Image (spheres, rainbow, N blue to C red):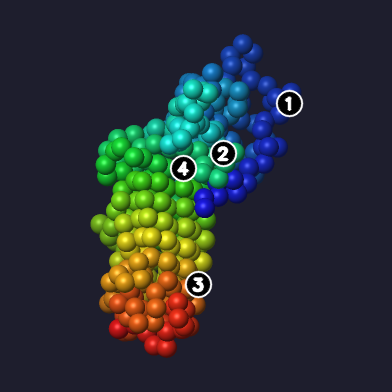
């Protein structure tokens, strides 16, 4: 299940008002000299449901927060470890909007400042609710190095063609590389996370439910990806869980797959590790468990597969893609790579 309540957010980061007051008579104009994450990183607060939310503020006062993440991003500085902290809201499928805090995060933002951390602070495991702004849009487009996104629940049951997070190489100055996405949920969008020529990324402890196209995908418009890590994630009811064509040196470990049309598809990928995943999709399907057709020098080891040894040759492919070692089927371990 999703695990947004694993986000570590320490209350002592709140500013010390007695020592760092703002300008008298002008709320929300405090300096950013309060407690920080490190020598440089300031904290910017966002809460569209707050009675005093206003994008004309400096964002460093939790009692006068910014209204939008887009505005907070304009106040971030490159490689300063600035953190944008976003408050929880009620807009979930079963949320009771009559109790208040009904405004979700409803934005399409582009991150072009490297070294930014975007944190949703939620009391539950789902995360801070973020609804796409329009059809065929991405909630977050990352075109900067060293960005961390955690603690959000990206969901949509109405708009078509939506993406939660798109990281991409845009120009030589805007590499969407070294991205970390952790403790997030993705529900019924077209795409969960798309990585286009974005290397050295990490997707950790995330939950993907009902993606209509791909949960994790490399569209290869700008180029392939390398050195991606996907660990401790759960994939259920997705049209395709992991689809990474022509991707190399990736680490796919300790994930769980349930009732997906396709689990792991990495065509023409080389030197990837697929280790100790649990896959319980349709056992009689074709190439719907692990499909490495066209790849080379991969290793597939210790995975737990919800198919029999007889079904293994059809559900998985193929023997020329690398080493298949000690993979466990329902009636024993497969003795040879799949055809």
Q: CA distance from mark 1 to mark 4?
A: 36 Å
Say if mark 1 contacts mark 3, CB within 8 Å: no
Q: In whole angstroms, how far apart are the C-alphas of marks 2 and 3?
A: 30 Å
28 relative position to 261: left or right: right
Residue visible at 55% across and 36% down? 85
The circle on residue 19 is 1
- Determine the secondary structure under disc 2: loop
Question: Which is more N-terminal, label 1 or label 2?
Answer: 1
Residue occupying the point 38% across, 60% down: 259
Q: Residue at x 39, y 32 (%)?
A: 106
Residue 321: x and y, percent? 33, 81
Estimate the spatial distance between the alpha carbons at disc 2 and disc 4, rounded to whole Å.
Answer: 10 Å
What is the quadrant of residue 155 in the picture? top left
Task: Look at discs 2 and 1 and give the one toward the viewer.
Answer: 2
- Res. 49 visible in picture: no
> Mark 1 or mark 3: which comes first in sequence?
1
Find residue 133 and report its image quarter.
top left
CB under 8 Å between discs 2 and 4: yes
Q: Which residue is mark 3?
A: 276
**Chain-order first, disc 2 or disc 4:** 2
């Amino acid at each position: 299940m999703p695990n947004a309540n694993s986000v570590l957010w320490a209350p002592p980061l709140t500013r010390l008002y007695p020592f760092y007051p703002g300008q008298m008579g002008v709320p929300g104009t405090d300096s950013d000299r309060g407690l920080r994450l490190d020598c440089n990183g300031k904290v910017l607060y966002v809460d569209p449901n707050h009675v005093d939310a206003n994008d004309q503020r400096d964002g460093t006062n939790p009692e006068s927060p910014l209204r939008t993440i887009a505005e907070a991003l304009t106040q971030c500085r490159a490689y300063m470890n600035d953190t944008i902290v976003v408050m929880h809201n009620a807009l979930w499928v079963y949320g009771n909007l009559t109790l208040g805090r009904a405004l979700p995060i409803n934005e399409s933002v582009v991150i072009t400042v490297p070294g930014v951390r975007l944190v949703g602070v939620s009391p539950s495991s789902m995360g801070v609710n973020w609804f796409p702004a329009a059809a065929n849009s991405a909630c977050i487009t990352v075109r900067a190095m060293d960005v961390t996104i955690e603690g959000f629940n990206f969901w949509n049951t109405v708009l078509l063609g939506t993406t939660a997070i798109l990281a991409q190489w845009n120009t030589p100055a805007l590499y969407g590389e070294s991205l970390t996405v952790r403790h997030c949920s993705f529900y019924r969008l077209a795409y969960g996370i798309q990585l286009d020529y974005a290397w050295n990324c990490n997707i950790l402890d995330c939950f993907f439910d009902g993606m209509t196209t791909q949960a994790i995908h490399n569209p290869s418009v700008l180029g392939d990806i390398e050195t991606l890590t996907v660990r401790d994630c759960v994939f259920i009811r997705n049209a395709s869980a992991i689809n990474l064509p022509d991707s190399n040196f990736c680490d796919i470990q300790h994930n769980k797959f349930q009732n997906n049309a396709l689990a792991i598809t990495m065509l023409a990928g080389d030197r990837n590790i697929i280790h100790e995943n649990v896959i319980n999709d349709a056992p009689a399907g074709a190439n719907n468990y692990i499909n490495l057709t066209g790849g080379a020098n991969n290793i597939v080891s210790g995975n737990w597969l919800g198919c029999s040894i007889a079904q293994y040759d059809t559900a998985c492919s193929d023997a020329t893609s690398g080493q298949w070692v000690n993979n466990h089927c329902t009636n024993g371990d497969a003795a040879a790579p799949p055809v």
